[in-house]
Amino acid sequence: MTESQEPTAPTTDPSAEASPLWLQGRTAVVDAARGEHWRGEAPNYHLTDEIVPRERTRHHAAGSLEQIVEDLVRVFEMEVSHKNDPTTWVSMVSEQFRTRVNGGAWASSQDLVDQGSYNVLIGESPYYSKDHSFESSHDTFHAALPGGFFWEVLEVFSGPPSISFSWRHWGKFTGAYHGVEPTGELVEMFGMSVARVSDDLKLLEVDHYYDSSQLLSPLAGGCPVTGVTSGH
């Protein structure tokens, strides 16, 4: 899942400048990217400082493994959502990377681009149809969660090269979802992931485990989604 342009606070780690770019936080990676790397304009992540500190449930020490994992995954989500060429993604070894959900089929970095990241990470569901383009799927969730869909690491259970961790996604349902009027309620989704990383902490493989209906059922009012079109 993605953070729907959930902004990133600058890292507070004083050693960040000596770290590889992909470990310096999302803002550094955005600033380092060239204009032609973006699907449109560079993403604007201006809400994190205001919202995430007061709504997150875990506060990780600077330089801790939890903070490093959280920053790396946020860079990955930003690149998948906003950079159109996997060869420019610094968070992973793009030619080797693969990911899957709940033991399903593996998807490569190029699959995330060609099929759409939401289509890969959610798949077909009573509450979501894969009859979406990359752009229309992102537009759908940005419309339903206009205040942002935020993400945090809850706990890290093992360190590299195989990092296992639990996480939380959250946002407020303040926009319509496929014609379902918003309730204003907080929607949350919890999951676990296992990420295999290279020696320099680039992503090689990520296994996700979660129930997407935790998010989708409240958005759809508990009713199946019908009549979805591909949009763009």
Image (spheres, grey):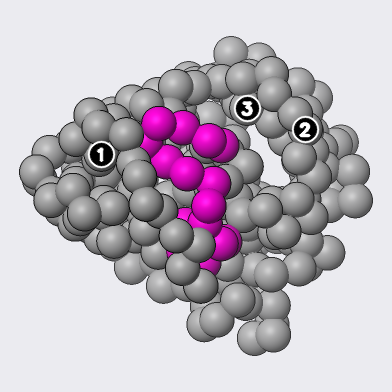
Q: CA distance from mark 2 to mark 3?
A: 8 Å
Between tags 3 and 1, which lies in front? Answer: 1
Kindly identify which residue carries mark 2.
Answer: 106
Q: Which residue is mark 3?
A: 101
Between residues 228 and 152, which one lies in front from this camera angle?
Answer: 228
Whether residue 131 is in magenta: the answer is: yes
Q: Quadrant of residue 146?
A: bottom left
Is 101 situated above or below 37?
above
2 or 1: tag closer to the N-terminus: 2
Image-quadrant location for residue 34:
bottom right
Q: Residue furthest top?
A: 157
Q: Residue at x 58, y 67 (%)?
A: 82
Q: Which residues are magenta?
A: 123-137
Q: Furthest-front residue in view? A: 227
Q: Which residue is mark 1?
A: 220
Q: Name the image quarter holding residue 138.
A: bottom left
